[in-house]
Image (cartoon, grey):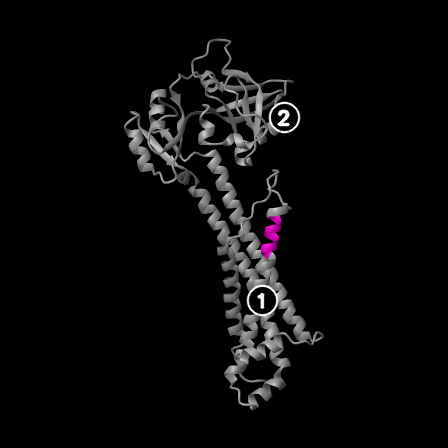
Amino acid sequence: MNVSLRIALKYLFSKNKKSIINRINRFSIITLIISSASLLIVMSGFEGLKNFGMNLYEIFESDFTVIPEKGKKFSILDSQIKKIHASEGVLSISGVIEEKVFLSFKDKTHVAYLKGVSPSYIEVNPIDSLISNGNWIDHESNSIVLGKGLSQILGAGVNDYSSYLEVSVPKNKKLRFGETPMKSIFSSIGGIFQISKEFDDKFIFSSSEFARELLGLDQSSYSYLALKTQNDFSKKEIDLILNEIIPEKYIIKSRSDKNSAINRMVKIENLAVYLIFSLVIIISLFNLIGSLLMMFLDKSDELKTILSLGETPKNIQKIFLFIGLLISGLGSLSGIVIGSLILLLQNHFHFLYVPGTSIPYPVILTFKNILIVFFTVLILGSFTSVWATRGMKKPII
């Protein structure tokens, strides 16, 4: 073993528990443990939130969405939908009618977006798996499914027969004297879904027949087509299929197109958090500088003896460089172990929950994040040790 490394190990793991130097060393290691564990936990939390968000979008947003190039609706015949569904690579398809509506329940009102869907919709977007109360749409009745946020705003619950939910839209025609400007349909609440506040406060679902009756649409009118495809399908392949079947001009949007802004935001936030906690690590490394300087002063007499025995000033510097690296490495590894245990306990016992939901806070421990934390602490510790030991070639006389 290298002589400088052996001396560094002796100094770092000295059995003199009362030594103030040993206490400072332990404090330096503890601060690095806390910083490393915190960085790993936060990065794993962001990884979990990103994955959680993408999973929710996969449930709510289809692989591909086909919308009209102009206007809010386009005409697609059932025979055309069947042809698209029969095409290679298309697993499922559903026509969707979407419109802004006014909701009234007792004395409360709110604006929402209605999605009128066919029975095949849950094959494209399995949102029925997120029903927290009640059941998915009964296509034989006028029942609807509300987001949890909307149910709380309106004070409406599943099978609440004290009043009916009134769904209204403005009439698209000239009104005669005394005629009401709104067309309304009364419905019951069959179920409540819970995804996230962004969706729960905004959307309601009904059968496509309910939406057509409310909006006065014919059987071939849709706001968009939702498609579920094989994993390796591209927009170009979808376009080749649709181009032969749909005469109207359309625009194809993939899930990645719609979620690109969210992905960018998550990456920027992840980077910002990483930089903030790296700064915390740098601040905690000031303890390391003080620890090395104090140890150098404390061991001055021993270092004179070592020099007199033939060691070079460069090897004296290496002793404290090794001590700095050992403290950084121990702090980093211990922090990773403690952080990993906390993350595993969260995954198993669910101490924390996503605010406003009964969903456990998602955390994902990845080998990539472990390496990032380890090398971040080690590299910053190395630079700190080199800087702190640059003048430690000779003991103070």
Q: Dot 1, how many residues are within 10 Å of its Cα: few (below 14), some (14-19), or many (20+)? A: some
In which quarter of the view is residue 69 placed?
A: top left
In which quarter of the view is residue 334 placed?
A: bottom right
Q: Is residue 392 visible?
A: no
Q: Position of residue 68 (x, y in %)?
A: 35, 28
Give the labeled residue for mark 2. 155
Q: Secondary structure at mark 1?
A: helix
Give the labeled residue for mark 1. 330
Q: Nearer the viewer, residue 18 or 149?
A: 18
Q: CA distance from mark 2 to mark 1?
A: 55 Å
Where 195 falls versus 142 (above or below)?
below
Query: Residue at coordinates 52% horizontally, 82% vertically from top-left?
Result: 315
Q: Secondary structure at mark 2?
A: loop
Q: Which residues are magenta?
A: 339-346
Residue 345 covered by magenta stretch: yes
Q: Position of residue 116 (x, y in %)?
A: 47, 23
Query: Residue at coordinates 59% horizontally, 44% vertically from top-left?
Result: 361
Where 9 falls versus 205 (above or below)?
below
